[in-house]
Amino acid sequence: MAYRNGIYVAFHAGGTTNPTASDIKYYNMMKAWDANKSIAFTLINSHEKTSAVRDSSTKETLRRSLVARLNNSKNMVLILTATTKNDTDWVPFEIAHAVDVCQMTIIAVYPDYDSILAPAHLVEYWPSALASRITNGTARVIHIPFKQPAVLDAIGQFGVLNTAYPTDGYGYYSREAQVAWGLIKP
């Protein structure tokens, strides 16, 4: 049995390795939070738990590496932007494995939003692999804006051992919590 303490971050790379031209910039921001000693955040990065794969690696090699990383993770941070739903290979695979095999909580983060109080209204951001699992009740998802206090709280709170919340695919933080973080004006 794997020790599941990692945080798996999934994002749409858009077919590029350019860190400013894809959603990898949000993953890099999380790594910067971890490196900043004035922020109480530790990113146990699942992507660093297995050997690196290169663009020239075979698809099967990459798939095995992603499975190993997911199997060692306590949750998945899924970065959802307007282009994420266009990913047809790795993001859907990662979602399917995270939910169907690992039964982990997905922390859906939205860089385009300052607060989230109605996750069902964000369906246009969801890849079909996520939408179908939310609809059929197999995914446990907390929907949050990509804002530091919300991300840090969700990562610390939701993992494979926490089955009480979120109980379904439409979880979100209360208005009061988002006000306390300064995301919504009182």
Image (tube, helix red, strand yellow):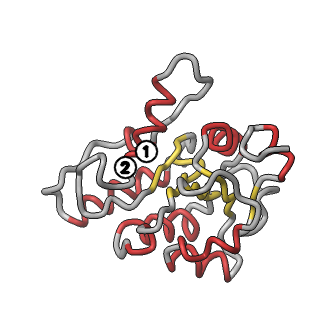
Residue 179: give x, y in percent of width and height. Answer: 81, 43
Image marks 2 and 1: residues in contact by CB distance under 8 Å: yes
Quadrant assignment, res 63: bottom left
Q: Which residue is mark 1?
A: 27
Quadrant assignment, res 164: bottom right
Residue 55: give x, y in percent of width and height. Answer: 17, 55
Q: Which residue is mark 2?
A: 24
Horizontally, residue 136 falls left or right of residue 127, namely right
Residue 85: give x, y in percent of width and height. Answer: 45, 73
Q: Nearer the viewer, residue 154 or 38?
A: 38
Horizontally, residue 42 falls left or right of residue 136, namely left
Q: Where is the C terminus found, in terms of image quarters?
A: top right
Amino acid type, residue under disc 2 in the picture: Ile
Amino acid type, residue under disc 1 in the picture: Tyr
Q: Could you tell me how many numbered marks the image carries?
A: 2
Q: Residue at x 27, y 59 (%)?
A: 62
State the separation of the CA atoms marked 2 and 1: 5 Å
Q: Residue at x 37, y 49 (%)?
A: 24
Q: Secondary structure at mark 1?
A: helix
Q: Report the disc number at residue 113.
A: none
Q: Nearer the viewer, residue 159 or 185?
A: 185
Tell me the crowding category of disc 2: few under 14, some 14 to 19, or many 20 or more residues within 10 angstroms, Cα based: many
